[in-house]
Image (tube, rainbow, N blue to C red):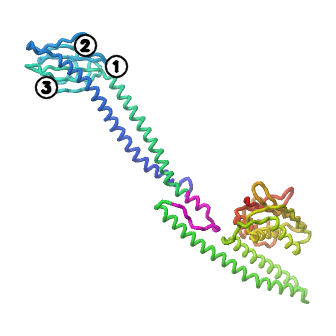
Amino acid sequence: MAEGSRSSLHRRLFGWLLLPLLIVLPVLGTALYRQVQHSAQSWLDEGLEDTALTLAGQIDLRSGEPRIDISVTMDRALRFDRQDDVFYLVLAPRGEVLQGDAGLVELRPLPPPQPAGSVHYGDVRLRGRELRLVQLGRDCGDGVCQVLVAETLHKRDALQREITTFVALNGVALAVLLALAAGWAIRQGLAPLTDLSTELERRDLHRLTPLAARLPRELAPLQAAFNRLFERLNRASEAQREFLADAAHQLRTPLTSLQTEIELALLEPHDPRVDPLLQRLRQRVVRSARLAQQLLSLARAEDRSVDVGQRIDLRDIATESGQDWAHRPLPAGVDLGFELAEAPALGHAFLLRELLENLIHNAVSYAGAGARITVRCGSAPDGPWLEVEDNGPGIPAADRPAALQRFRRGDQAAGTGTGLGLAIAADIAARHGGRLALLDAHGGPGLRARLSLPHP
C-alpha cells in the first residue's frame, strides 16, 4: 500500500473522539442556550409582573366601585426604561378603562380575562410592533379587574443576541480546547509506539538484542513478539555465519594443498603442451582460495561477538598491510605507495586489516598494468579516515552503489573478481559505525575508496 493511502492511527483516533464531540456539543449548546434564555426571559417577565402588581395595589375599592389614581410622578416611574417603551392599562370588571393606555385594547391577539390572582404571559402585536405582555387578574368586589403591562422587545432581543454569542463562542472555545486536549492525549498515548518504532529502526542483523522499553500493558505482547522474532533471526544468523565460517575453513586447506601441487607440477619436467592447462588450473585455484578467504572474512564481519571498541591506530594497520604486500609479487609496473599519518580510532584491528586488504587487492586487480596505488590515512574534524586511491579506469558513478553489494560487479569491470571485496569492506565499515564511499581520484581518472570512522 502506498504511503499516502495508509490510514493514520492518530487521525482515526482523533476522528472517533471528534465525532461524539461534534454531536454532543451542539446538543449541549442548544440546551444551555434555551436554559439561559428561559432564565433571562423569566427575570424580565418578573419585572413586568412587579409593575402589574404595583398597579393592582393602587386600585381603590372603598367607594364600592373600583377606582385608581396614578400621579404623574408615579406614571413616569412605571414607564421608565432605558431601552424599551412600557405601556399599561387597568380595566374595570365590565371592561371600562380605569387608567393607562386605552390603545392596549387593540392588542392582537387579545388575551381573555384572567381570574383573580392569575397571571398570563404572552407575545402580542400592537400596530405592527412586537410586545411582551403580562396580564394580571385583581379581585374588585363584584368582578375581576384586569391589569395589563406590556413593553417592546429591544432589551430582550439584545439579551438574546448576547446569549447566542456567549453560547456560540464558549461552545467553539470548548470544542477547540477539547480537540487540542484530544490531540495531545493521542500523541502522548501513541508516544510509546513511536519510541518502539524508533528502537526497531536501529535494529539490524548486527544488533538483535531484545527490546527493553517500558511500554503500556497493551503493547507488551507486541514487544514480546518482536523479541521472539529477534531471537529466531539471531539463531538463523548465527547458524549462517557458522556454516559460512566452517565452509571457508574446510575449503582453504585443500585449496592451498592443490595450489601447492600445481606449482610443484609447473616446476617439474612436463610436456610444454600441458603448461597452459596448469596455469589456468593455478589461476582457478587461487581465485577459489581468495573466495574462501573472503567468505571467512564476511562471517567474521557479521560476528556480533567481535569487540569493535578497541583503541587502535589506522596508521599501524596500514603499516602492517604495507609490510605484507612488500613480499607479494605485483603486476608489471604497479606502484604501491603509502602516505600515513596518525589516525587514532576505535575498532577491531583484524577486521580493519581485512578491509584494507580487500581495498588494496581490488585496486591491484582492476587498476591495470602500470597503475599507481596510494594508501593514505589521517584524522579529520569529523573523525579518522583511511583511503586507497588508484589511477586506473575507476568505476562509473552510476555503478558505484551496486559495486558495494555482494556478488555485484560493474558492467565494465575486468579481471576475475567475485564481487565480494568492496561489499566486505562496506560491511566491516558499517560494523564499526563508519562508512565506505567510492569517490573520484584526486586530479585525474581512477577510483578513491575512502573509509570514514566516527570519533574515538
Element under label 3?
loop
- Pointers 3 and 2 in contact (C-beta within 8 Å): no
Give percent across and percent down for residue 183: 49, 48
Q: How crowded is the residue under tag 1: few (<14 C-alpha within 10 Å), some, or many (20+)?
A: few
- The residue labelled by disc 2 is 75
- The residue labelled by disc 3 is 115
Give percent across and percent down for residue 131: 28, 22
- The residue labelled by disc 1 is 83
Q: Amino acid at mark 3?
A: Pro
Q: Amino acid at mark 2?
A: Asp
Residue 9 in the figure: left or right of residue 205? left
Q: Quadrant of the N terminus?
A: bottom right
Residue numbers of the magenta segment: 195-214
Q: Which residue occupies the foreground of this view, 420 or 115?
A: 115
For residue 244, which quarter of the picture?
A: bottom right
Point out the tag, 2 or 1, that comes first from the N-terminus.
2
Magenta run includes residue 359: no
